[in-house]
Every structure is written in C-alpha cells, then in structure tokens.
Amino acid sequence: MADYILIRKGRNALSSIIYIILNILLGVGSIALTIITKSWIPGIALVLLSKWRIFAVRPYYWLLNIKSNLVDLIVGSSFVLLAFSAGVTEILPVHWILAAGYAIWLTLIKPRTSALANEAQALIAVFLGISAAVMLGAAYNSIWLVLAAFIVGYGASRHILVQSSEEHDFTLITFICGLVASEIAWLCHSWMIIYTFGNSGIALPQLAIILTVLGFLFGRVHRSILKRDGKFKFADVAIPTIFSFLILAIMILWFSKPVFDI
C-alpha cells in the first residue's frame, strides 16, 4: 500500500512538472512564433489549439465552453496581438515581458480559483483585451473597438459573477456590463490616448486603464452584495469608490497629454 501511494505521488509530481513545462512552452512559443512569422495568425492558432477541449464534446456544449473559457481566450489572444502590434522586425523588451507574462498567467494565475483570484483574472483580461483592441483597432472603424469592448466586458463580468455563484442567472447583468464597456469605448474612440515608455515598446492605452479601474469597482460592489445576501450598502464600497474615481480624475485631468495620441 505504501509503495502504491509513493508511485501515485511520483506520477502526480511528474504530471505537474510536465504541465508547467508545456504551459511555459505555450506562453513563450506563441510570442516567439508571432515574431518569427511576422504574423499574429500562427500565435493565435497556437492559443486556440491549446483550448482543444472546448470542442472535444458535443456541439451543444460548445457555446457554454467558449463562455467558460472566454477570459483565458481573451488573455492568450491579447498577449499575441500585443506582441504583434509592438512590432515584429526586431525583438523589444516588451516581447520578453509579454512572453514571461503569458507563462506566468498560464502557470500561476489561471489555475487559481479563489474569489480574489477570479477578480484578478477578470481585471487582467480587461486590461490586456482592451489594450490589444486599441492598439490594433484604433486606425479602423470604431465598430471593431466597440465589439471587442463588449466581448471583454461581457466575459470579465461573467467570470466574476459565475465563479462566485452558479445558482443565479447573470445573463442580463453581464450583457449590461458588455454594453457599458462598449459605450465607453465608443466615447473614447475619437480621443484615444496611449502612453509610451521610450523604446521599450510598452504602450498603455488610457481606455484600458479606465475600464480596468471600473472593473475593479464592479468587483468590490459585487463582493459587498454577495456578503450581505443581495443587499447593497455604500459604506462597504466607499473607500474603493473614492479610490477608483480619484485615479480616474487624476489620469484624465493631469495625464491626458501623452507622448502621442491616435
């Protein structure tokens, strides 16, 4: 019996090591493939290939699986698209950051299931998803940015709500969150501000910061309501609300003169 337990533990440890290695290879490989091929398509294809389990069931469950994995799909695709938008003619510091960031997401952040981890995962998806949408869609019709913002807002809010409670139907709330995100994106499209940092290739869209802050506030409000069995008390979220709007006010009033705007 003792030998059996040791064998099982050894197999579990080996499986964990292989899992970590494969995820690191996926994170680094998707960015490297994007740079080598000078196209975002192979990188996105690799991300989608890693999610083969979504379609390894009857078609009836495909939509549900896509919704359940939407945050992970947004994050993975965003890492690839951000690497492509930063430029593929030479390797920049941002490429190393994105490769390491994706590997960290896959090995350390995505597997966690606590309420705090769920909120963090959703906020990461908002920031990266909107950043990628801005960097690639700013030069095109606003409908693409609006559509991307809706998908990100819907997916992130659903991730927070469903992970905390699967007993309720949050379809309407998540749809409204998607609409709010798309509306803000549409309003900001004509004055899209991006902060850059020298020749590092790092670019932070103001819209991504705004929606991430609002997503943080949404998570705080939801946690307060959940804690009080469906009742809302402003005192519970007074500090996060003041903090969030203070950040937005400072950024909009004093940091709206970027290196360049598009």
Image (cartoon, rainbow, N blue to C red):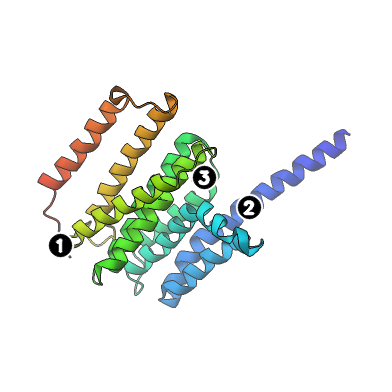
- Residue 249 visible in the current orientation: yes
Q: Look at 81% across and 42% down and name the residue there.
A: 7
Q: Amino acid at mark 2?
A: Tyr
Q: Quadrant of residue 62?
A: bottom right
Q: How many residues crowd mark 3 within 10 Å: few (<14), some (14–19), many (20+)?
A: few
Marks 1 and 2 close (CB-CB < 8 Å): no
The residue tagged 2 is 19
* Residue 222 locus on image (x, y percent): 39, 34
State the separation of the CA atoms marked 1 and 2: 42 Å
Which residue is depicted at the point 34% across and 27% down?
Answer: 232
Q: Nearer the viewer, residue 8 or 161?
A: 161
User: For the residue marked with disc 1, what is the amino acid?
Assistant: Phe
Specify the amino acid type for callout 3: Leu
Q: What residue is shown at x 81% (from left), y 38% (from top)?
A: 6
Q: Earlier in the sequence, mark 3 or mark 2?
A: 2
Return the disc, 1 or 2, that comes first in the chain's sequence.
2
Q: Which mark is residue 108?
A: 3
Q: For mark 1, what is the residue?
A: 260
Residue 141 higher or lower than 130, as above or below: below
Alpha-carbon span between mark 3 and mark 2: 12 Å
List x then y, in percent, for residue 228.
42, 23
